[in-house]
Amino acid sequence: MIQIQNLTKPDIPIVQNLAKEIWNEHYRKILSQEQIDYMLDLFYSTEKIHQEISDGYSWEMVFYNSLPVGFMSLKYEFEKVHLSKIYLHSDVRGKGLGKELIQHAIELAQEKNYFAIYLNVNKYNTDSIEFYKQLGFQIIEEGVFDIGNGYVMDDYIMEKNI
């Protein structure tokens, strides 16, 4: 059984631990360990998560059979919602949770009268790209984004009209 709930302060260390485990498992074949560590520090520090919540991001925790297994965050922008983060532990991938999370994001966006959801995905993250395509996302652009310390994100931007 899946449960999705708003992130609370006590959940932040859980998200940080999940991010570390998921990123080290999923991105090891795409990114160097140094870049993974840098990006985890950049995107998942307690201060960064607090700042995003203060800036209006919606952070959600995902539970499966009462265990924390993932998270997502949404940023409400002008007319579109940026699906900033969506991650599930490898133990629960393939069980339909990703589809449920995307559907949940769509419902949240529709409640606020947004017309599209978009996300960034690493160009070499082929499994995720295929997953998003199956759910109706299309590649609308690509870019290389400097994230500091000599690292870049080489991404596709994918979008789904809702």
Image (cartoon, rainbow, N blue to C red):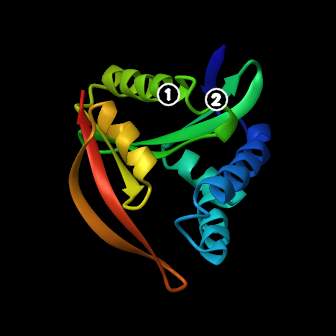
Say whether residue 129 is left or right of residue 59.
left
Classify mark 1: helix, strand or loop. Answer: helix
Quarter of the rendering occupied by the C terminus: top left
Q: Are marks 1 and 2 in contact (CB under 8 Å)?
A: yes
Mark 2 Cα shell of 10 Å, populated few (<14), some (14-19), many (≥20): many
Res 58 visible: no
The x and y percentages for residue 152 are: 44, 75
Residue receiving disc 1? 101
Q: Quadrant of residue 141?
A: bottom left
Q: Which amino acid is tagged 1?
A: Leu
Q: Position of residue 85 (x, y in %)?
A: 50, 46
The disc placed on residue 62 is 2
Who's the residue at 43% across and 29% down the image? 102
Of the numbered discs 1 and 2, the one sitting upstream in the chain is 2
Along the line of sight, which residue is nearer the eye, 64 or 146?
A: 64
Q: Residue 49, image x and y in percent? A: 62, 52
- As helix, strand or loop, the secondary structure at mark 2 comes to strand
Tag 2: amino acid: Val
| Closer-to-camera residue (17/76) | 17
Label 1, residues with CA under 10 Å away: few <14, some 14-19, many ≥20? many
Left or right: residue 52 compared with residue 91: left
